[in-house]
Image (cartoon, rainbow, N blue to C red):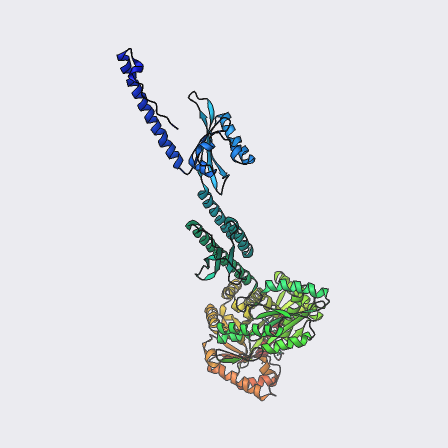
Amino acid sequence: MTRQPGRPSKSMNAGSNGGDECLLQRFDALQEQHLSLTERYEWLETMINYVPDFIYAKDRDGRFLFANRAIVINNDFNNVEELIGLTDAEIHSAADAEKIDEVERRVMETGEPDLGVEERRIRGEGWLMMSRVPLRDRSGNIIGVVGASRDISARKRAEELMSTQTRLLQDVARGVDLGSFLRDAQALLERLLDGRRVHFQVDDRQAEVFTEEAVEFPILSRDGGRHGVLMVAKAWDNDDAGLMEFLAGVAQTAGIAIDRHQDITHIAYLAEHDALTGLPNRTLLDRKLGELLEKSSRQQKCVAVAFVDLDNFKFVNDSLGHAAGDELLKVVARRISTQIRNDGIVSRIGGDEFIIVLEETSVPMSERLRAILEAISAPLTIDGVEIRVTCSIGVACSGEHGDTASELFASADMALYRAKESGRDRIQLFTHAMGEEARNKLVRIEELRRAVERDEFVLHYQPQKDIRTGRIIGVEALVRWQHPAEGLLLPGAFIPLAEETGLIVAIGDIVLRKACQQNRNWQDRGLAMLRVAVNVSARQFLERSLTDQVSSALQSAGLDPRWLELELTESLIMRDLEGAIERMRELKQLGVSLAIDDFGTGYSSLSTLRRFPLSRLKIDRSFIADIPHKAGDMAITAAIVSLGRTLELEVVAEGVETEEQAHFLAGAGCEMFQGYLLARPLPPSEVEDLILQMTTQRDGD
Ligand SMILES: Nc1nc2c(ncn2[C@@H]2O[C@@H]3COP(=O)(O)O[C@H]4[C@@H](O)[C@H](n5cnc6c(=O)[nH]c(N)nc65)O[C@@H]4COP(=O)(O)O[C@H]3[C@H]2O)c(=O)[nH]1
C-alpha cells in the first residue's frame, strides 16, 4: 500500500548551490521519516493481522476503510482489498447489519465510545466482546468508527458450565425430588452439549440403551460406594479437559443428590415406622386407618380395631434382659404380620402394645383374632430359653363401636382393660356398658380430685389389743370418704382409683397429718398412750418425698415418732427390694416403726425378711377367717407367729371375729390382734369411749 518517493536530481535544482544542498538535506530527512513511518505502519499492520481479535475502521457511511485478517477470513474474503469500500449490509443479513449500524451510528453521533459489549458471533458459534470508538481526523472531526472485538467464547462457556453446576447444586440444596433433579440435569447437559445424548444410570432405575460410544463418569456415594454412572455420548472431536472436569463434577453433584434422597427417604421411613420391629407407627396407622374407614364406610363394610397387650412381657424383660425383650417383640410383630397378611395393618405403639386393624373378609373377625392370639402365644426360644407369652386383646368394630379412629381406639382400649382385668390371655369385644363405666370412672376421678381440694376425708380407727394384758395399745387409721351425695364411702370404693390416678399421694398425706394430729389430741387429753398405724400405698412409697411428708406430719402435730407406725404391704416391698430397703431405712431413722401388712400373701423369704428394719408383722385376715376350720391356715398362722419370734418381731393378727380365733392366737403366742371381735373401725369419739370403757372395766375387775 506504500510507495517510496524518489530523491530529486541536482539538475532539477540548478541555480543556487547552497539552497540545493539544504533542500537535499531536507529531502533526505523527509525520506528517512517516511521510511520509518512506513516501517512502523507495516509492523502495525502485521501485528493487527496476526491477532485473533477482529479490528476494523469504517467511514461515516459504514464502509470499511480497514479490516484485519481475522475479519477477512471470518467473512470468507481472500484479501482486505475485496472488503474495503463494502458496508455490513453487503456482507451480513439485513437484521445483523441493522444492529451493527445502529450502534456505530450512535458512537459517531454522540462521540461516546461503546465499550465491552458482549454479543453473539454473527458467523459461526461463540461470543465476542465488542468495543467501538469514534474515528477522528487531525482536527478532531468524527470521520468514522473504529471497532475491535475479542473472542470471549471460552469465558462464556466456562460461565455457562459454572451456572449449570450452580443450578444443580441449588436444586440439591432445595431438596428437589430425585426424579426431577435427574431429568433437569439431563436436559441441561444435553442443551449445553448441543444435543449430545446424556443419561444418568442409577442403581435401581431402568438402564437406557446407549448405542453411541459414551464417556462414563462414576456417581459415587458419600461412603465411597457407587450409585451409578453418568453417560455422555462422545464428541466427534475430543472434549476439552475443562468440560471433562465439569461433567465429573456433575456426576459428583448427582451423587450428593442421591445420598440426600436416600437420607430423606430413610427419615420419612423412620418418621412413620417403629425402629425395632419395622412396623408402621402410630402416625402412619392414623393416616392409613383414616383412609380405610372412609373406604369401608363407602363399601358398607366393617373395620375391626384391636388393641393387643402382651401379658408377661415385663417378666421376660426383667428376667432375661432388654435384648431378649426386644427379640420377643420382633417375633410377635412377625407373627401378627404373618397372620393378617394384606387384609389389615399392624402397628406397634410403644412398649409391648400393638394395634391391629382388620378389614372385613369372608373369614369372621373373631376367627382371625383367635388365630392371632394363638400365634402370639405359641412357644418360642430366646437365648436358649423356651418361653411362652400370652396376650390380651380388646376389640372394637367400626359402625357399632365408633365411627372415627379415635372413637374406635378409645373403645378398643376399654375392651383391652376389661380383658386384662378379667384374667388376661383372652379376647374381649367392646360393649356399650364399658363405655358407661368409663364415663362413670371419669366422673369419679373428678369427684375424687375435688374431695382432695375440699378435704372430704375422715379417719376411722380400729383398735388393736394386746392379748397378754388385754389393753388397747394401738389403733389402725382407716380412711373414709365423706361423699357429698353418697354418704360415707369405704376405701375399696376409691383407693384403687386414687392409686391409678396418683391422687393417693395427696390423700396419703392428708391421712398421715390427720392420724398424727388425732393421736396427739388423745395424748393431750390424757387418754392411754396409743400407737397409730397408717397404711402406705405403693405409689406413695415410691415418692421421693415420703420421708419428708412423714417428718412434716409428725412435726406439725408435735407427735413423738415412736407413736406412729407405717404399714407397708409385702408385695410393695418385693417390687424393688433394694430400693425398698433403702427407703425403709430412711423412714426408720425418723424414729417411726414399720410393719408389714397382709403378711403371708407375698413372697418374702426368711433371708429377705431379716434385712427389713421392721417392728411388726400383720397376719393377713384371709389366714384368720377360717380358723378353726382350716388346719392349713392354722398351721400357717402358727408358723408366722414363730417366724416373728425368731426375727424378734411382734405379730398382729388381722380380722379376728370370733373367740375361737382369739383363743387359738393366744395359744400360738401371737401378741396382738385386731378385728370385729374387739371393734370395727370407729370414729375417734367412739374409740375414746371404748378405751375409757375398757379401762373402767379392768379397773373394776
Ligand atoms: N372381714 C373383716 N374385715 C375386717 C375385720 N377387722 C378389720 N377389717 C377390715 O380390714 C381392713 C384392714 O385394713 P387393711 O388390711 O390395711 O386394708 C385396707 C387398706 O389396704 C386400705 N386402706 C384403708 N385406709 C387406707 C389409707 O389411709 N391409705 C391407704 N393407702 N390404704 C388404706 O383399704 C383397705 C380396706 O380398708 P377397710 O375397708 O377399712 O377395711 C379394713 C377393716 O375394716 C374383721 O374382723 N373382719
- Picture quarter containing residue 15? top left
Closer to the camera, 445 or 402? 402
Closer to the camera, 192 or 401? 192
Q: Looking at this view, name the residue that lies furthest to the front.
A: 11
- Picture quarter containing residue 602? bottom right
Report ligand 1 position as a quadrant.
Answer: bottom right
Closer to the camera, 351 or 359? 359
| Residue 684 visible in the current orientation | no
- Residue 321 percent across, percent down from the top left: 48, 74
Number of residue marks: 0
Task: Tell me the quarter of the image containing the N terminus.
Answer: top left
| In the image, residue 544 above or below residue 473 | above
- Residue 633 percent across, percent down from the top left: 57, 85
- Residue 658 percent across, percent down from the top left: 62, 83
- Picture quarter containing residue 684? bottom right
Closer to the camera, 166 or 629? 166
Task: Tell me the quarter of the image containing the C terminus.
Answer: bottom right
| Residue 255 visible in the current orientation | yes
| In the image, residue 619 above or below residue 130 | below
- Residue 447 percent across, percent down from the top left: 65, 63
Give left or right: position of 133 versus 522: left
| In the image, residue 37 above or below residue 464 | above
Q: Looking at this view, name the residue that lies furthest to the top.
A: 15
